Image: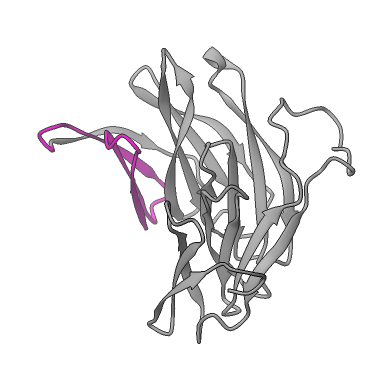
Amino acid sequence: KGVAFSDDGCFLATCSRDKSVWVWEVGLDLDVECAAVLSGHGADVKGVHWSAAAPRDGAPTPRLLSYSYDGSIRVWQEFDDDFECVAVLAEAHSSTIWCVAVDSRSRRVASVGQDGALIVWTVSERGRDGTAPVYSTVTSCASAHARAAYTVSWSAHERGLIATGGGDNAIRCFELSSPPQFSAPQSGPPDSDSTPALRVCAECRDAHNGDVNCVAWNPTATHLLASCGDDGCVKLWSLCSSQL
């Protein structure tokens, strides 16, 4: 179902219909050895995505996000040559999560799913050795797409734009109305006056003649976005105004 290398290239994660995630350690001579088999999802695991955790002993530790048809995201982190589940993001999407993306500082996560929703989570670091994360929902857009939202990508642009694509043939770019604070989550409901909102800053409603399967921002030319769809086309978009 999915495969991803960690940023340092030392780990390779794979996932499949058997509800498991396998983590492989990749040596300098390209020897590959299974480092861990991770279980916990209640359905097929759709994909995996690596992120950086808070530095430990002067270096960031690898953190892995897996997302599933069971509507949850599980967060795994390496401790003492093993991987542990340190957080479960559940009950936010009503069904399959199709894609997740992480911002350039690994402090926020965006997820999209079969329900057409876009959800943004913030990460605060605390707990075991200061590296066990706490994920809290910052904001969401329940109707980001009229049909399933299949893909999400977080730009390195200074505005931190989030691009999504879905089964309604559309591509939309969102930005947060105000930057979230990265403090530890408070008890009780958030103050509505301080909660950032997702705002559509650009869109193309007929981006492809069919489902939009994937979008990806250029990491250096941060106004450029690539997309592909069921129509067999790959397109490049330039964000210049409220339209792509």
Of residue 225 and residue 120, the one placed in the foreground of this image is 225
Determine whether 82 is above or below 65 in the image.
Answer: above
Task: Specify the quadrant of the image occupied by residue 118.
Answer: bottom right
Indicate whether 85 appears above or below 145.
above
In this image, 169 relative to 37: left or right?
right
- Pick whichever, 132 or 229, lies toward us: 229
Q: Position of residue 196 (x, y in %)?
A: 78, 46
Could you tell me if residue 16 is visible in this image?
yes
Direction front: furthest residue: 240
As displayed, is residue 123 above or below residue 166? above
Query: Is residue 60 found left or right of 116 in the rendered image?
Result: left
Q: Which residues are magenta?
A: 1-30
In the rendered structure, the answer to whether residue 155 lies left or right of residue 186 reads left
Is 21 magenta? The answer is yes
Front residue (pair 91, 154): 154
**On the rendered structure, is 11 left or right of 47?**
left
The image position of residue 163, as x and y in percent, is 57, 61
Residue 42 shows in this picture: no
Location of the C terminus (image quadrant) = bottom right
Camera-side residue: 89 or 236? 236
Which quarter of the image is occupied by the N terminus?
bottom left
Magenta region includes residue 139? no
Residue 59 spot, x, y in % from top left: 40, 20
